[in-house]
Amino acid sequence: MTDMKDRGKASESMFAIDDELEFKVAARRNKLLGLWAAENMGLEGAVADSYAMDVVKSDLEECGDEDVYRKVKGDLEGKGSDISEHRVRKVMAELMETARKKIMDES
């Protein structure tokens, strides 16, 4: 009986670690995406860093990536950029892998 409780606790612990890891990966991806978008909008330095943090915060609006996509795509369009939906989504996917590798290297 104790073995089952121990297994349950271990399973819950691993699930919590996985959730935390995925949160960190998504936040890192969003920051990188924000910096990419900032560069495409001609933002530099502290302004670009601030924009990247706004992108990170935008992910708290709803589950999934659509809130982040809408923010970045809308802001790019607002600055007159003609970067396509496909390109933004491709960059999001590429940066997710980059972020995952960076986070795993830090662990």
Image (cartoon, grey):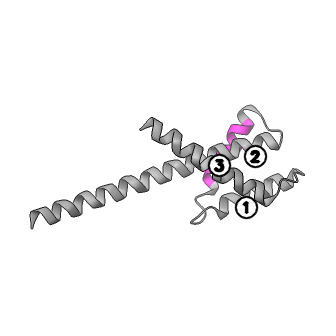
Q: Amino acid at mark 1?
A: Arg
Image location of residue 31, percent across then percent down: 63, 44
Which quarter of the rendered picture does the N terminus lie within? bottom left
Residue 70, labelled with which disc? 1
Residue 48 on the magenta segment: yes
Q: Horizontally, is 16 left or right of 104 in the view?
A: left
Secondary structure category for the residue under label 3:
helix
Q: Horizontally, is 14 left or right of 42 in the view?
A: left
User: Which residue in the rendered view is the most extreme toward the left?
Assistant: 1
Task: Say which quarter of the image contains residue 19.
Answer: bottom left
Which quarter of the rendered picture does the C terminus lie within? top left
Query: Label 3 belongs to which residue?
Result: 94
| Disc nearer the start of the sequence (2/1) | 2
Query: Label 2 belongs to which residue?
Result: 37
Secondary structure category for the residue under label 2:
helix
Category of crowding for the residue at label 2, using alpha-carbon neighbours closer than 10 angstroms: few (below 14), some (14–19), many (at least 20): many
Q: CA distance from mark 2 to mark 1?
A: 12 Å
Task: Say which quarter of the image contains residue 4.
Answer: bottom left
User: Which residue in the rendered view is the most extreme toward the right?
Assistant: 80
18 lies above or below 28: below
Dot in front, 3 or 2: 3
User: Looking at the image, can residue 99 be seen?
Assistant: yes
Determine whether label 1 and label 3 are within 8 Å by CB: no
74 lies above or below 38: below
Q: Amino acid at mark 3?
A: Glu
Q: Which residues are magenta?
A: 47-57
